[in-house]
Image: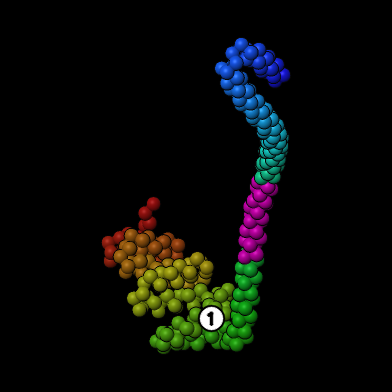
């Protein structure tokens, strides 16, 4: 800037020196030079002001830039901190999730074990209830039988009444009395006779299947009783009536071989002879 002013002053002296040589024209040129100098000064001032303004703005902008840079750095640091915190939280949460998952699995395993134990306890409880109910039922049945036994007629009286009604043709009453005798006195020798007479009533009524069942009870439970031979004979005859001739023939042959000198053996031989059979059992 100082160099520009010296240049302008030197130019002014030159103009003044030349003005003595060129008087009217030189004066006019000097005036223009002065105007130009003035404009140059003004331009220089404007440039100076513009430069100052520019410097000020540059300073402001630099300051703003520095502030923005600091703010950006702070924001970036904050973001990094948040990201680090978020990553840590995610890691912690993942660890917590794994821990909770393990605890849940342990609880599920414990629950399954408890369910198994509960099922076993429930089964044991049900078994105990069933046993208790069975015992109560048996006790009640025993009490009922005891009461019935206390109210039941003496065995001889009950059996003789049943036999009397049987011989008198009162089959329904006789069946009831024989059933009562078996219920109250199942282990006596006459119980086998009661089964036999009930089978006889069923045989006469044509109910051969029930008759066979009661004849079997005589043979199975009272094989040495006085009605065993008759039960064997009548079982064979009942089997023949139901169409099972082979089985019936085998029963009749068994009567002959086991009770050869009895009236039942004679009846069995007569039946086999009428059927064209021999008295020898097949092997």
Residue 278 visible in this rendered orientation of the protein = yes
- Give the quadrant of residue 102: top right
State which quarter of the image contains the N terminus: top right
Residue drawn at the location 62% of the way across and 61% of the way down: 123
Q: Is residue 226 magenta?
A: no
Tell me if residue 157 comes above or below residue 252 in the rendering.
below
Query: Does residue 263 appear in the picture of this structure?
Result: no
* Magenta span: chief secondary structure: helix
Magenta-tinted stretch:
100-126
Q: Nearer the viewer, residue 97 or 250?
A: 97
Callout 1: SS: helix
The quarter holding residue 85 reads top right
**Picture coordinates of residue 227, whole percent (x, y):** 47, 72
User: Does 179 appear above or below 32?
Assistant: below
Q: Nearer the viewer, residue 52 or 177?
A: 52
Residue drawn 42% across the image and 85% down it = 172
Image-based side of 256 in relation to 127, left or right: left
Question: Which quarter of the figure has residue 8?
Answer: top right
Query: Which residue does the image show at 33% across and 63% down from the upper left?
Result: 244
Q: Position of residue 246 (x, y in %)?
A: 33, 60
Residue beneath disc 1? 181
Estimate how packed mark 1 is, as few (under 14), some (14 to 19) or many (20 or more) residues with alpha carbons within 10 Å.
many
**Which percent across, then down, holds residue 113?**
66, 52
Query: Is the residue 171 above or below the residue 189 in the image?
Result: below
Where is residue 249? Give x, y as percent.
35, 62
Q: Looking at the image, which residue is at 28% across and 66% down?
A: 274
Front residue of 235 and 129 = 129
């Amino acid at each position: 800037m100082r160099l520009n002013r010296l240049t302008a002053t030197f130019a002014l002296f030159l103009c003044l020196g030349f003005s003595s040589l060129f008087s009217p024209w030189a004066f006019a040129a000097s005036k223009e030079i002065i105007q130009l100098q003035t404009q140059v000064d003004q331009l220089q001032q404007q440039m100076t002001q513009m430069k100052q303004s520019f410097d000020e703005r540059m300073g402001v902008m630099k300051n703003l830039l520095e502030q923005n840079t600091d703010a950006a750095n702070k924001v970036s640091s904050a973001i990094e901190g948040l990201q680090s915190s978020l990553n840590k939280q995610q890691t912690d949460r993942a660890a917590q999730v794994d821990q909770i998952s393990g605890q849940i699995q342990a609880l599920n395993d414990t629950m399954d074990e408890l369910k198994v134990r509960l099922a076993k306890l429930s089964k044991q409880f049900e078994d105990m209830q069933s046993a208790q109910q069975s015992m109560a039922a048996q006790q009640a049945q025993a009490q009922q039988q005891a009461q019935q036994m206390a109210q039941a007629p003496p065995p001889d009286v009950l059996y003789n009444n049943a036999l009397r009604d049987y011989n008198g043709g009162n089959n329904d009453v006789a069946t009831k009395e024989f059933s009562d005798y078996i219920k109250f006195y199942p282990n006596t020798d006459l119980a086998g006779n009661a089964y036999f007479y009930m089978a006889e009533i069923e045989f006469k009524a044509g109910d051969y299947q029930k008759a066979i069942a009661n004849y079997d009870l005589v043979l199975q439970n009272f094989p040495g009783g006085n009605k065993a031979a008759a039960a064997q004979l009548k079982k064979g005859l009942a089997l023949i009536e139901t169409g099972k001739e082979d089985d019936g023939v085998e029963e009749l042959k068994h009567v002959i071989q086991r009770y050869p000198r009895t009236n039942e053996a004679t009846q069995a031989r007569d039946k086999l002879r009428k059927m064209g059979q021999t008295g020898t059992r097949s092997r």
